[in-house]
Amino acid sequence: MNLLKCWKNHFNNFRLSQKMLFVYFLIFGAFSTISIAAMQTTLAIYDNKIYENSLQELFYFVNTIENELDNIEKSSSSIAIDYEIQKQLTNMMSMSNKQEYLLNMSSFRSQLLNEALGNESIMNIIYTDRNGVELNVGEKYVALPEDIYRTILEKADEAKGGFVYIEPTLEFPYLVSGRDIKEHIDYSLDYLGTLIFINDINVIFERNYEFLKSGQKNICVFSNNEIVYENDGEYFKDIPSITDEQGYRIINIKHKKYFMCYLKSEKTEWTFVNLFPYTNIFMLNSIIRMLMLVGFFVLFITAYFAMKKLSLYITAPLEKLTKSMQIIERGEFEQAKLYLDKVEALSEVGILKKDFLIMIDEVMTLIHENYEKQIILKDTQYRALQAQINPHFLYNTLNSINWMIKSNENEDASRMILSLGTLLRVALSSNTVSTVLEELELVEDYIFIQKFRYGKRVEFIIKKCSGLELFKIPSMSIQPLVENAIFYGVENSLQPCTIKIKLDKEEDYLNIIVSDNGMGMEDDLLEKVKNFQVKTTGNGIGLKNIKERLTLLFCEDFKLQIQSKIGEGTMIKMTIPTYRSDFNV
C-alpha cells in the first residue's frame, strides 16, 4: 500500500508530457505483452503439431519396415511349405545316388534363385541339409561368417520350423533370417533342410525413406543399446540413452541443436531414431518469432518517438505558460510577456494564455499605480518608528554630561558626548538597515553612557561570534533590548545586576540574546509586554518598534521571544535569518 502511494506521488510530480509517455508505455506494453503471448501460444501449438506429425511419419516408416520383415518371413514360409518343393526335397532325401541328388539340387537351386531375384532386399538364399550340402543362390554373393552361420542353424533348430533372425551389426550389416523346412505332405515333420536369407538392411530402409518428409534424414536403429543400422555415424554416438517407448526431444550435438524423434517397434523391439537439425523443421517458426520481436521493438521505438514528439507539441504551450508564471514570481513582468508567443488559438490553452496575458497587464497597471504610494508609505513608517526612540534617555544623558563638566571630568564628558553623538547619528540617519557588527558597536557606546549613570549597580558582558559584518538587521534593533534589560533588571533591583549580550550562529540563523538577572516580571506583566500593551515610557515600546521593523524587513522569517520569571530575571531572544544578507532597503 505504501509502495503504491509512493508511486502515485511520483506520478503526480511528473510533467504532463511525462505522464502521457507513461500512459503510452502502459497501454502499448500491455498490448505488446498480450500479442507476444498469443503469438507464442499459437506457435507452441504449431510446434506440438509438428512434433506429432514427425512422430506419425516415423510410425509409418516403422510399420513399413515391419511389413518388409513380414514379407521376408512370408517368403521363407512360402518356400518351406510349397508343395512342389516339399515333394522335391522329400524325394531328394530318399535318393541314394549322389549324381541324381545333385541333379535335383540343381533344379531346386533354380527355384530359390527365382525367389531371390524377385526381392531386391534379398542378397542371398542359402539352403543346407542334414548331409552338409550347401546351396547358395542370389544376385550378389555375401559370405556368411561361420559364427553367424552356426548361430542361425541353432536358432532354427530350436524354433522347430519357426522363423528366426539375427539382427545386423556394424561388423556384419545384414539381416540374417531363416527357418527349418519340415515335411508337411504326410505331416511327419521330418527335417528337410534349412533356409537362410541374407537381406540388405540398407535397401530396406532407403526405399522407405519417402515416409520421412523432413529434408535431412538421419536414421538409426537400436536393439538393446546396440546399433542395428545407421546411415550416418557422425551423430548417433552422442545421443542420450532412450528408455521410453516413443517421444521426441531437443538435444545438443557438437554445439548444434537437433530434433530427435524415436519409436520402439512392438514386433522387433528395435528402437527407431530419426535425427535432423532443429532449424530444418523449425526455421520458419524461429524466423516468425524473430520477425515478430523485431517488429514489436521497431514499432515500439517508432511509436515512442512519435508519442514523445506529439506530447511535447501538445504540452509545449502549457510548459511555456508555466515558465512564464515562474518568471512572474521573480517580478519580471515584461520578460514574462515576451516569453509567451503571440499566436492566437481557440483551444483551452490558448484561452488560458490570453487570460494570463490580460492578468499580467492588469497587475502591472496596479503596480505602477500604487508603487510610489507604497514607497512613500514605507518611508513614512520607517521614520515614524525611528521617532519612537526614548526621549528620557537623551535627557538623562545630557544631565550626566552637565554634572561631569561641573565636576571637571572633561575626558569622560567628551567620550560620553561622542557616544551620544553616535547614537543620535544612527537614530536620525536615513539608513534603515545596518550590519550586526555596526549595531553591536552602537550598543557598546550606549553601554558606555549607561555605566556612568548606574556605576557599580550594573555589569555588562558581551559575547560575540565572527562574521557579524556579513549580516544585516534594522537599525537600532539591539540597543532597545539593552535598554529594556536596564529598566526591568537594574532600576527595579536593589542588588547589582548583570546584563549579558550574546550573539551566536545556528545553521541559517543568528541568535541575539539579551538577558539580565534582575527581579523579573510576573506572568500578567510579561503577557502584556509580549502583546505590547504596556503604555508607560520604557515598558514595551522598544520591543514593538523592533518587531515592526523586523516584519518590514524579514516578513515572517524571524523570531522575537521574551522569557521572564520572578527572582531569576528576563531574557529577550531575537532570531534573524543569515541567508538574507543582500537586501538594500
Image: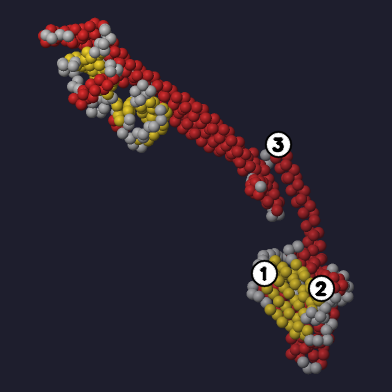
Residue 29 in the image: state x and y as whole percent: 57, 37
Q: Mark 1 points at which residue?
A: 506
| Horizontal relation, residue 131 to residue 510: left or right | left
Q: Looking at the figure, which quarter contains the C terminus?
A: bottom right
Amino acid type of the residue tagged 2 in the rendering: Gly
Q: On screen, 319 above or below 185?
A: below
Towards the viewer: 286 or 498: 286
Secondary structure at badge 1 equals: strand
Secondary structure at badge 2 equals: helix
Towards the viewer: 494 or 315: 494
State the residue at coordinates (28%, 16%). Answer: 161
State the residue at coordinates (74%, 86%). Answer: 415
Marks 2 and 3 sit apart, C-alpha to C-alpha, by 58 Å
Towards the viewer: 477 or 166: 166
Marks 2 and 1 sit apart, C-alpha to C-alpha, by 25 Å
Residue 375 in the image: state x and y as whole percent: 78, 61
State the residue at coordinates (19%, 20%). Answer: 142
Crowd around label 2: few <14 · some 14–19 · many ≥20 (10 Å): many
Q: Give the mark nearer the N terminus: 3 vs 1.
A: 3
Foreground mark, 2 or 1, reads 1
Amino acid type of the residue tagged 3 in the rendering: Ser
Q: Mark 3 points at which residue?
A: 347
Q: Mark 2 points at which residue?
A: 542
| Horizontal relation, residue 570 to residue 246: left or right | right
State the residue at coordinates (79%, 63%). Answer: 378
Foreground mark, 3 or 1, reads 1
